[in-house]
Amino acid sequence: MTNPQALDFSKVETLRRHMLLTTGDMSTLFGVSRMTYYGWVRGKPIRKTNDATVRRVLKKLLNVMSEHSWPTPDVIVATGKERMQRLNDLLNV
């Protein structure tokens, strides 16, 4: 089995901003510290143990965008906490 192509975190950052999420939100979704997430954004490699989780979460986020038209107007005006709660509800369905 070949190794998957390395993730381009500039694209992950574009996704994060489009979805109106903070770096703290992303690190929580990926199950890592903010410092680890910042490292990935700066180009540090992702450990194999985290790679599958990150890819799985990214697929779910893209699915929320396409199937639920995220961010909807009510998501745009929501507080950060409300936004994350709504996102978690959609991710856990």
Image (spheres, rainbow, N blue to C red):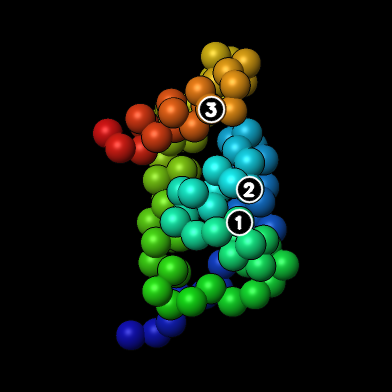
* Contact, mark 2 vs mark 3 (Cβ under 8 Å): no
Question: Would you name the residue on which mark 3 appears?
Answer: 81
Is 27 situated above or below 64? below
Q: What type is the residue that disc 2 sits on?
A: Thr
Image quarter of residue 31? bottom left
> Which residue is drawn at the image coordinates 53% and 73% (left, top)?
46
Is 29 situated above or below 2? above
In the rendered image, the quadrant that contains the N terminus is: bottom left
Task: Give the structural element (helix, strand or loop) at label 1.
Answer: helix
In the rendered image, the quadrant that contains the C terminus is: top left
What mark, if any, has residue 23 been given in the picture?
Answer: 2
* Contact, mark 2 vs mark 1 (Cβ under 8 Å): yes
Give the distance between the C-alpha atoms of the residues marked 2 and 3, in whole angstroms: 13 Å
Dot 2 or dot 3: first in sequence order is 2
Q: Residue furthest bottom?
A: 1
Q: Is residue 58 visible?
A: no
Image quarter of residue 33? bottom right
Give the distance between the C-alpha atoms of the residues marked 2 and 1, in whole angstroms: 7 Å
Camera-side mark, 2 or 1: 1
> Dot 3: few (<14), some (14–19), or many (≥20) neighbours within 10 Å?
few
Residue 59 in picture, x, y percent from top left: 42, 51
> Dot 2: few (<14), some (14–19), or many (≥20) neighbours within 10 Å?
some
Q: What type is the residue that disc 3 sits on?
A: Lys
Dot 1 or dot 3: first in sequence order is 1
Image quarter of residue 63? top left
Question: Would you name the residue on which mark 1 appears?
Answer: 34
Task: Give the structural element (helix, strand or loop) at label 2.
Answer: helix
Dot 2 or dot 1: first in sequence order is 2
Q: What type is the residue that disc 1 sits on?
A: Arg
Give the distance between the C-alpha atoms of the residues marked 1 and 3, in whole angstroms: 17 Å
